[in-house]
Image: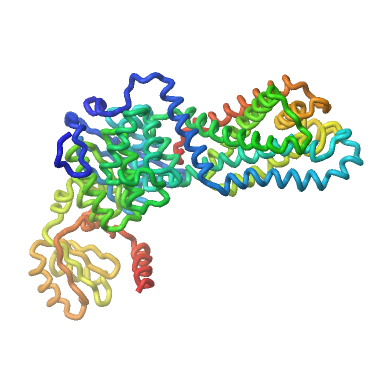
Amino acid sequence: MVSKVPAFADAESEVEVPSAAAVISVQGLVHRYENRTALNGVSFDVRPAELFGMLGPNGSGKTTLFRILSTLMIPTAGRAVVMGYDAAQDPAHVRRQIGVVFQAQSVDPKLTAYENLWHQGHLYRLRGPALKQRVGEILTRVGLADRAKERLETFSGGMQRRIELAKGLLHRPGVLLLDEPTTGLDPGARRDLWQYLQMLRDEEHVSVLVTTHLMEEAERCDRLAILNEGNLVALGTPMELKSEIGGDVILLDAAHDAGSLAEHIRARFHVETTVLENQVRIEREEGHRFITDVVEAFPGEIQAVSVSKPALEDVFIHRTGHKFWSESQEEAQSNSAAKRR
Amino acid sequence: MATQSTALARPGTPASAGLLLPAFTLWWREIVRFYRQTTRVIGVLASPLVFWLVIGSGFGTSFRSGGGPGQQHYLDYFYPGAMIMIVLFTSIFTMMSVIEDRKEGFLLSVLVAPVPRSAIVLGKVLGGTTLSAIQGLIFLIFAPFAGVHLAPVQVLLLAVVVFLVSFALTALGFAIAWPMDSSQAFHGIVNLFLIPLWLVSGAMFPLTGASKWIQVIMRLNPLTYGVAALRGLMYPGAETSFPLSSAIATLLLFSLVMFGLALLMANRRSRSSPI
C-alpha cells in the first residue's frame, strides 16, 4: 500500500478508465403515473469517471429518474442503460454494477457499523476473510474504523450517512448513484461528503450520479442535467450553462407594478425582460452601466437594484421563465425563518 | 467490461451462493434485531402466559360442567391452543418488519442488490419462523403445570409441528405485509381474519361440540390441524379428530402454499411504485 494517502484513498484500486462509451445512457425516458407525467422524454449520457448532477426542484422528476436507474421502477417508454445493460430488461446485471445511496436511511440502527456492512457484503456475495478485510478497509476510509463495534443508533446523522456511503461502495461498483445525499446534514458534513465524492472520481474513477436541489452542490459537478416538470431543460458543465447568459444578471425591485415597469423598460431599452413576482429580471452585458440608465429613466419606480454574475439559478430562470422555488415554497421558507427569529 | 474486474463479486460463484448467502444474512438480521429489542422479547413471552392463565382459569369451572373435553381441566385443554397462539402472534408480527424495512429504506437497499426475490422471501420468512418456533417451544417450560410429560421423541415431533405452523404463518404474514405501507392496516387484517381463525381452530373449544357450520370452518382452517397435532402429542389419551400423520401432511401443504403466495407477492414488479 502506498503511504501518505488521505484517509479516504484506497491505494489498491487502480482501475482502468473505461473507454469513452457512456456509463449511463438515458434515452427518451418517459414515465407516467396514473394521472401525472413525471418524465417527459429525457435523454442524456453520463461519461466515465464523471461527477454528474441532476438538479431540479421537488417534483421535477429526478427521483423518478433515480428509481428507474436503480432498477426499482420500469419506465413507461424509453430506455435507461447502465454499463451496457438495460435497467428494465436486465436488472440483475445492472444491480451488480451500481452502488446506490438513498435519501432515506437504509442502515439498520440496531446493528453495529461492522454488522451493517457485513450484512451488505453478503447481499453482494462477498464473504469470509475477504469481506472482513473489505469492511475494515471501507470503515477506515470513511473514518469510522474506531466505532465499528457500536450500534448505529448511537451515531450522528453525518456518521450514519458515511455508513450509507460505505454500504454503497462496499462491492466496488463502477457507478455510484446518490439521491439527495446531503439531506439533513450540517454544512461541515455536506462539505466532507462532496470532497469524498470528488476523491472517488479522481482516485478510483468511479462515475457518480447525484441528485440535488441545491445550487451550491450542483456547482461542484462536472456536468449537470437540469430538470423541470419532467423535462430536461439544460445539460452541460456549470460553466457552459452559465456562460450562455449574456453578461450580467440585473434584478430590479419594482416600487409599484413589476409588469408595467418591465413593459416600459422593454419599450425604452429594447431588452428582454422577465417578471418574477415583484421583480424585473434582465440579462445584459455591462450591467453596472445599464442600471444607472434605468434608474435615471424611471425615478421612483425602482426600489432596489442588484447586479450579479450569472449563477445556476439564472440558468434555470433563463430556460424555464420562472424561479427555481415557487412563491409558496419560498414563503414557507421565509415564514419558518421569521418564526425562528 | 474493464471496471467489472475490480468488483469483488465473482461471477463464477456457485448459484447457491446467490440464494443462500443473502437468505442467511437476512435471517441473521431478523434474529439479531429481535433479541436486541428487549420489550419485544418480554411481550411475546409474557402475554401468552397471562392469556393462558387468565382465560384458562376463568373458563375452567364452566367448561367442566359443560362436559366438553372429558375429565381434563380447562387449563390443560387450553395449553396447546395457547402455544399455537404464541406461534401465531410471533409469526405474524415478526413480519411487520417488512413494513418497517420498507418505510425506512432498508428494503430499498436490499432490492437494488443483485439478490433474487426468492432469497429475500426465504431469509425473512425463515427468520420469523425461527423466532416464533423458539418462542413456542419456550412455552414448553410450563408443560408440567399443564399435566404434560413428554418423551424426547414427542418433543421432536412437537418441534416439527411448531416449525411448520410457524413457517406457514410467517409466510402468510410476509404476503400480507409486502404490499402494505402502514402497520395500522396490517393490524386491521390481523384482527379481522387471523384472530377469528385462531378462535375456531379448536384452541378454545373442541370441534365436536360446535355447531355444523363452525365445524366446516374448523375443518378448512389450517390452524385446526396444528392444534390437533399438538394436543395429540401432549395428551396421548385425548381424543383428536385427525391422526398425527395427516395433520402434519396438511400443515406441510399449508406451508408450501403460503410460501408460494409470499413468493408471488414479492415477485410482482411495478411500474408505479418502487417495490
The answer to whether residue A10 is seen in the rendering is yes
Instruction: Give the percent coordinates (x, y) of residue A246.
Output: 12, 57
- In this rendering, would B171 be left or right of A251? right
The front one of B143 and A235 is B143
Reply above or below: A19 against A290: above
The front one of B265 and A8 is A8
Name which quarter of the figure residue B140 lies in: top right
For the rendered model, the colour scheme is rainbow
Quadrant where the N terminus of chain B is found in the figure: top left
The front one of A141 and A280 is A141
Instruction: Give the percent coordinates (x, y) of residue A20.
Output: 17, 31
Instruction: Give the percent coordinates (x, y) of residue A232.
Output: 28, 45
Residue in view at x 31 percent, y 29 percent:
A130
Residue in view at x 62 percent, y 32 percent:
B166
Reply above or below: B159 against A104: above
- In this rendering, would A52 be left or right of B24? left
- In this rendering, would A125 be left or right of B118? left
The answer to whether residue A47 is seen in the rendering is no
Name which quarter of the figure residue B78 lies in: top right
Instruction: Give the percent coordinates (x, y) of residue B11.
Output: 33, 22
* Total numbered circles: 0
The front one of A274 and A234 is A234
